[in-house]
Amino acid sequence: MPRKYWLLLFAAAAALLFAGNGSLLITDSVESNYALTAKEMVLSGDWLSPQIYGHYWYDKPIFFYWLTALAYKMFGFTEFASRFFPALFGLGSVALLAWGGSKLENARSGFFSALVLLSSVEFFLISKSVITDAVLFFFFSVTLLFFYLGYCDGRARYWYIMYAAAGFAVLTKGPLGVLQPALMITLYQV
């Protein structure tokens, strides 16, 4: 595949996933819980015990709160900042699928796989929402891809990346981050 197609794909992905994020208001209660908890994290300086409305809030693991709080430190308390990391991890998922498809099959497969993912409405929505799903999707995909690469190739570095990604998935969404990939890996090996 010519380089210009890859550049066009990633430019389109960045435009779709980041454009308008500053003008999308946070109105959903789930989004506001994440945004307010991260805001209180920044304002209080307590990055270990999430709080909302002055009460401790251990609804979800801390990683997504950290990402959102980091975005607030970089961009201020804006809707764009709230949506920055979901969009960035969405872009990372497109790149991961393009790379994985190219490595496992060929560049054409990687390109069109990434294009199909980018055109998915659900993927587009989670990459623009202040929820954990885009981050979880990325780490979940890394876990499964690097399991398969390690399984086929046997290189230890693939296994290490798989384990690290599973760990970040747990920090993003809890035990689901490791249990769901583990179930799929177990069924694959049966």
Image (cartoon, rainbow, N blue to C red):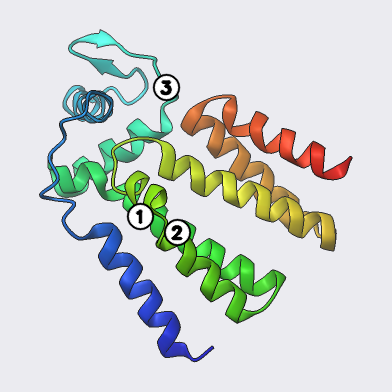
How far across and how far down the image is residue 159, in percent?
74, 50
- For disc 2, the marked residue is 92
Residue type at tag 3: Lys
Please indicate whether residue 130 sits to the left or right of residue 95 in the image: left
Compared with 2, 144 (above or below) is above
- Asked where in the image residue 45 lies, by quadrant, the reply is top left
Residue 66's disc number: none
The earlier-in-sequence mark between 2 and 3 is 3
> Residue at image x 44%, y 81%?
6
At mark 2, the secondary structure is: helix
- For disc 3, the marked residue is 60
Quadrant for the C terminus in the image = top right
> Residue at image x 38%, y 73%?
10
Taking the view exactly as shown, the residue that stands out farthest to the bottom is 2
At mark 3, the secondary structure is: loop
Number of other residues with Cα within 10 Å of mark 2, as a class: few under 14, some 14 to 19, many 20 or more: some
How far across and how far down the image is residue 83, in percent?
25, 45
- For disc 1, the marked residue is 88
Quadrant for the N terminus in the image = bottom right
Residue type at tag 1: Leu
Residue type at tag 2: Gly
Labels 1 and 2 touching (C-beta < 8 A): yes
